[in-house]
Amino acid sequence: MRIAAKYLYLSAEDTPVRNGFVEVDDEGLILRTGMVPDPSEEDLWIDGALVPGFVNGHCHLELSHLKGKFTRLSGMAGFIDQINSLRDSSSREEKIRCLENWMDRMWDSGVSAMADISNCDDSFAVKASSPMYTRTFIELFGSEPRDCDAVMEGARKLLEKAHRRGIDASITPHSCYTMSPQLLGEAARAGLSSGFLSYHSQESSQEEDMIRTGTGELADNRRKYGMSMPPVRGTSSLEYFLDTVGNPAPDENAHLLLVHNVCLCEKDAEAALSRFRNVYWAVCPMSNLFIHNTLPPIELMRRLGLKILVGTDSLSSNDDLDMVKEMYCLQSNFPEVSLGEIIRWSTLNGAEFLGRERELGSIEVGKRPGLVALCELDSNGRLTASSYSERLV
Ligand SMILES: [Zn+2]
């Protein structure tokens, strides 16, 4: 099959080929790419961009039943309260029906791979049968040091279950504010030894206040429920995480994904880069706007040359699981960033994090990334509020 488009985003190039074409075989393997001499002679012409399949860098598919149930702008403490009261507001059958539906929607809109968080096995069957590549992060939390062994034991059982289904999976810690230092360290070391870890990092200033000074809404919320608190460190939450994992870091070649990074500063980024060779940084802009109307420091992240990924997060803090909406949000708020660069964040960087860049993430001969049409672009080839994506291959 041959598909041609006004803009073709190849490889890791941020500038598209104008009037480009791609030839693929029946299995979606890229055979050839090139430039079109005459668009009017093409059978399959996309009046927009042709891009590789997306990699959703952060999702909680199993929370799909929570769509529309959460109040916006609750802040982090309010969000945690809502999760605790609504997590089991649907039956298991209803939860599975919702997540199957959203998995299909994501696939159809062009998501070829995903880093997905699981706290239970609700999503395992659909992930095992989907053509989408997923790595499941079995996420742990638990504020009480005495529960550490039991939580780790439960996680190992869930990990085994995922492996029996044939799903790639790793144990991973949730965040600094929901875990005892013991559990944070153990879960992180378990994840790193598998080669992959995905950690909610610096999502809100409340998290920073809690670790730096033991104050703020999140700290008050934890105290209200009589939970043990993480230590007050006088440092950022990311430095606390890195120190808890160990210095020097174990498995320094593991792929470490830090998710959110809203409160990231240069010193923190450098601390992470000095301990780990493969650090990736996911941004979930629509979720950040939903919970606390903030966005990550994209300018700083680009200046430091960080490998940025784009994620949708879950339907508890987003109205959609739509990569194009996340990309448009980034383009609108950071107009200096080219669409090509945002596409790279949404494709190749995620494939690299997942260790699947030989197959996914860019349109190159010999890869099978999936091919996606990006439609309703403006006259400069930029995204618009009505832009959408559709899988072609
Ligand atoms: Zn998340």
Image (cartoon, rainbow, N blue to C red):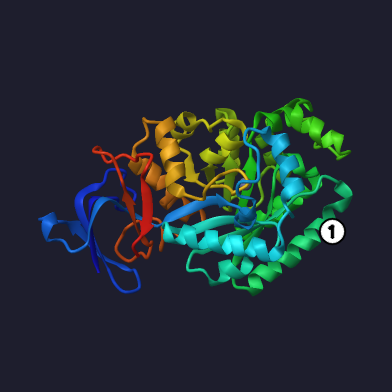
Front position in the image: 113 or 129: 129
Total tally of numbered discs in the picture? 1
The response on whether ligand 1 sits within 8 Å of label 1 is: no
- Where's the N terminus, which quadrant? bottom left
Residue 75 seen by the camera: yes
Identify the residue at image location x=82%, y=45%: 143
Q: Provide residue 108's location: percent of width, then percent of height.
A: 43, 61
At a point 74% along the width and 55% down the height, the residue shown is: 88
The x and y percentages for residue 71 are: 65, 38
Please state the horizontal and vertical placement of residue 231, each as a whole percent of the image. 81, 34
Query: Can see residue 355?
Result: no
Front residue (pair 386, 164): 386
The amino acid type of the residue labelled 1 equals Ala
* 7 sits to left or right of 242: left
Which quadrant is home to the C terminus?
bottom left
Q: Nearer the viewer, residue 34 or 43?
A: 43
* Residue 152 higher or lower than 252, as above or below: below
Query: Relative to residue 227, is residue 44 drawn left or right?
Result: left
Residue 16 in the image, given as x and y percentages of width and height: 26, 46
Residue labelled with disc 1: 150
Mark 1: which secondary structure? helix
**111 sits left or right of 263 in the view:** left
Q: Quadrant of residue 293?
A: top right
User: Residue 342 falls in which quadrant of the image?
Assistant: top left
In the depicted view, which residue is nearer to us: 274 or 173? 173
**Relative to 247, is 332 above or below?**
above
